Amino acid sequence: MTTDTTRVELDAVVVGAGFSGMYMLYRLRDVLGLSARVFEAGDEVGGTWYWNRYPGARCDSESYLYCFSFDKGLAQEWTWSGKYPEQPEILRYLSHVADRFDLRRDIQFETRVTAAHFREDLDRWEIETDQGDRVLARYFITGVGCISAGQMPRIEGLDRFEGEWHHTGSWPHEGVDFAGKRVGVIGTGSSGVQAIPVIARQAGHLTVFQRTPQYTIPARHGTVTPEFLDEVKGRYDEIFEKTRWSRGGTPYDEAERSALDFDDDERRRIYEAAWEEGGFRFLLTTFGDITFDRRANDTAAEFIRSKIRETVDDPETAETLMPRDHPFASKRALIDTNYYETYNRDNVDLVDIRHAPIEEITPTGIRTREGEYELDVIVFATGYDGMTGAFNRMDIRGRGGQALREKWAEGPKAYLGLSPAGFPNMFMITGPGSPSVLSNMPPTIEQHVEFVSDFVAYMVEHGIELAEADLEAETEWVDHVNETASRTLYMLADSWYLGANIPGKPRVFMPYAGGLDVYRTKCNEVAEAGYEGYVLHAREPVAAG
């Protein structure tokens, strides 16, 4: 980085204009009165919902929960259209939020942060962008999202493919015309499960290339009425409060009973009722030991496999679709609309690439070990470099020039999932080591943003120049995150939670599995103890707590 100090100076720079960046800007500017700028790579607000425009893109949290709670007027004036919000509707909602709070005037669009270095001579962060901006800021805050860095598999021959190809995480804004075309979809994770039924209805023929079968629960999108959504508004105070202090960021009454305390018939009756209701209630409200007791989990897994047998007409296809190598919900739990039913269509084929791997992309399609498939369009539903990918695409350096990617070479480390030791005044919204993707994101984001903004207010009030995580506190928190994960079934799957989808990435469980409620309590205790676990630098360094 240049040493020229004649550049813009701000109190804070925020990276990303999704839920996290927008609320962070509001708190910094409108609540604390600080100067702040958000840098956003897209040309509009939206974050992950700006980029993920693939067919069928929809949130898997219920719409009345997938929204901000910090402003009562905002909650009352917005009405969702159904049970789950689709991508265009979420984008309209976030645009409405930006308008309502006049956020765009402090967001610089079509600008990607390339570097952020902590200048020890100035006690400031020096940020550079691909547009030539150079900014000095007291606080450097990231709202880059947990699954914003798309992962393309390394398959030989893609550059020779004569058709068109797209990744679900960077979908053309004008859409893709599949009418009458031969389409191949690689991947059956969340985006694949959502896109495949929609593409199948449009394409001449669809070939799905599946490596790992998925457990997926029907969404039952049509089961919520406008009257219900209106009625919710009268209970929002109660709903939001219950959500804030829940394990998963929802107001559901989560089950505490054990699946092992019921006989087969009664247990199946409970599963059937939850299956008909749809969505994550199946995971959260049936039995409380599904996520940590393998015997209990096996009952849920076998129930879902029985539903695949009932739904898919061809027994061989049904068997190929059945997950057996990992527990239910040890990978990201999925919900769907007509996913299994899609394999009953005459224009859909399923290819098992675990047993017949893709060997190359040819000019006219895909060749596996057992055959060739001619295609006009290839869709890569191959997921993301989760949790750390977006950070590694920036050159972030802390004290002594230490690169964040080097600090994280053996796995991400950050106190509370918010602050890496050695990186003063840097805060990560939903960073690795926080509940993030294991919870409903908006209430989790609000908790993070409010903790950070309250911390900044405390620093301003007490004349504190810098705050950085204590190395010992960071180590203890990372150990706690790992120990908590070890008590669950998450460790029994090769998932992106562990970085298993990225060649060479260290296998470390990255989200915090202890629950949003436990995490919120911990953060409150940290704040009440004068931000224990942080070293606070005023004119003379003082250790907090």
Image (spheres, rainbow, N blue to C red):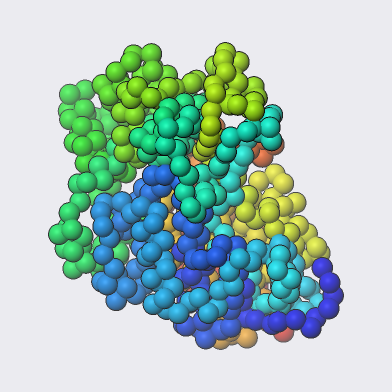
Residue drawn at point x = 57 percent, y = 59 percent:
144
Spot occupied by residue 102 in the image (x, y as percentages of width and height): 45, 79
Asked if one can make out residue 193 in the rendered structure from this viewpoint, the answer is no
Spot occupied by residue 283 in the image (x, y as percentages of width and height): 32, 40
Task: Identify whether 259 is placed above or below 386.
Answer: above
Image quadrant of residue 540?
bottom right
Does residue 468 appear to the left or right of 353 in the view shown? right
Q: In this rendered view, identify the residue nearer to me: 466 or 359.
A: 359
Task: Identify whether 97 is placed above or below 393.
Answer: below
Residue drawn at point x = 29 percent, y = 42 percent:
219
Residue drawn at point x = 43 percent, y = 27 percent:
205
Quadrant containing the N terminus in the rendered view: bottom right
Does residue 118 appear to the left or right of 61 in the view shown? right
Q: In this rendered view, identify the residue nearer to me: 495 or 472.
A: 495
Residue drawn at point x = 69 percent, y = 58 percent:
394
Most distant residue in the right direction: 3
Q: In this rendered view, identify the residue nearer to me: 526 or 3.
A: 3
Spot occupied by residue 185 in the image (x, y as percentages of width and height): 49, 32
Most distant residue in the front direction: 180
Asked if one can make out residue 243 in the rendered structure from this viewpoint, the answer is yes
Quadrant containing the C terminus in the rendered view: bottom right
Image quadrant of residue 91?
bottom left
Spot occupied by residue 163 in the image (x, y as percentages of width and height): 58, 35
Count of numbered marks: 0
Task: Identify whether 336 is placed above or below 466.
Answer: above
